[in-house]
Amino acid sequence: MAEEKPTDKPEFKIKNIIGVMSGKGGVGKSSVAYLMAIALKLKGYSVGIMDADITGPSMPELLHLKKGSIEMLDNYILPFDTEQGFRVLSMNLLLEDDEQPIIWRGPLLSKAIEQFWNETIWGDLDFLIVDMPPGTSDIALTVMQGIPLSGLIIVTTPNKLVSKIVAKSINMAKAVNVPVWGLIENMSYVVCPKCKEKINFFGENTDLKEKTDLEILASIPMLKEISDIPEKGISLSDKEITEVLGSISEAILKRAKI
């Protein structure tokens, strides 16, 4: 992180900044953010990923990145350029030990987010995906008030307990006037390997959809290929994966400025 206040920051333009949020942990928010980035990159767009989950960063694992991948230029942070063609910034890329805990209070966490935005040279991008932490506290507020988000995508699962907590994120976005583009329902169903029937493992929960009147942008099934991404990477030859990526990119591009 930069110790001195930088000056003369190079100008850059980011056309769309999308926050990926869920009030609840464990819904696969980071995996969805990663799939969004892949889907847009496959369409030929330039994509950056800001891992704003400072205390629980997941992007380095999903992207198979190692610590020490971040460089500085005149006191500005340079995001890491990955082999997949993304620009990525994550706290775990700045640590000497990627299992070192971040034991910071709220003001320091918020300062880190400010540096990730104000003191980072992102360059010109079509999309910047901001992977936000669970909850509605300091970091979420700093992102919503300090970064010019084009919109939020809320990740949920078809589970009543999850939906009630996710609703808090939606109401928070409304309170600070950040547009919510819609919902992505993760772990939406299971496909029977024999008969290919869709099985609603968690049932069908319509409470969140009815209360918020938000569109479900994509429904992502429970796939081993997705859970294996941190270990094996993504399989773009898998039909179910390509269908998921196609539905995600289609939904985003309907709302984006390109």
Image (cartoon, rainbow, N blue to C red):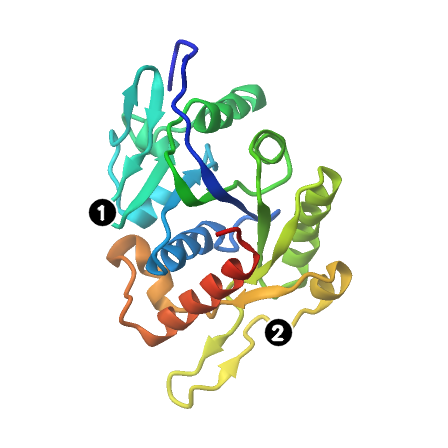
Residue nearest the observer in this picture, 5 or 188: 5
**142 is higher (above) or lower (below) than 63:** above
Which quadrant does the N terminus fall into? top left
Residue nearest the observer in this picture, 12 or 250: 12
| Residue 244 in which image quadrant | bottom left
Residue drawn at the location 53% of the way across and 63% of the way down: 251
**Direction from residue 174 to residue 45 in the image, left or right:** left
**132 is higher (above) or lower (below) than 157:** above
**Direction from residue 232 to residue 164 in the image, left or right:** right
Query: Can you name the residue that lies furthest to the bottom here?
Result: 195
Amino acid type at circle 2 is Gly
Residue 130, position as x, y percentages in the image: 48, 42
**Direction from residue 103 to residue 64 in the image, left or right:** left
Amino acid type at circle 1 is Glu
Q: Disc 1 on helix, strand or loop? A: loop
**Direction from residue 116 to residue 228 in the image, left or right:** left
Question: Circle 2 is placed at which residue position?
Answer: 203
Question: Circle 1 is placed at which residue position?
Answer: 83
Residue drawn at the location 27% of the way across and 55% of the way down: 231
The reply to whether residue 58 is visible in this rendering is no
Alpha-carbon neighbours of circle 1 within 10 Å: few (<14), some, or many (≥20)? few
Residue 154, position as x, y percentages in the image: 59, 53
Residue 8, position as x, y percentages in the image: 40, 15
Query: Can you name the residue that lies furthest to the right here?
Result: 211
**Tag in front: 2 or 1:** 1
Residue drawn at the location 31% of the way across and 53% of the way down: 230
Disc 2 from disc 1: Cα separation: 39 Å
Q: Earlier in the sequence, mark 2 or mark 1?
A: 1
**217 is higher (above) or lower (below) than 204:** above
Residue nearest the observer in this picture, 155 or 201: 155
Alpha-carbon neighbours of circle 2 within 10 Å: few (<14), some, or many (≥20)? few
Q: Disc 2 on helix, strand or loop? A: loop
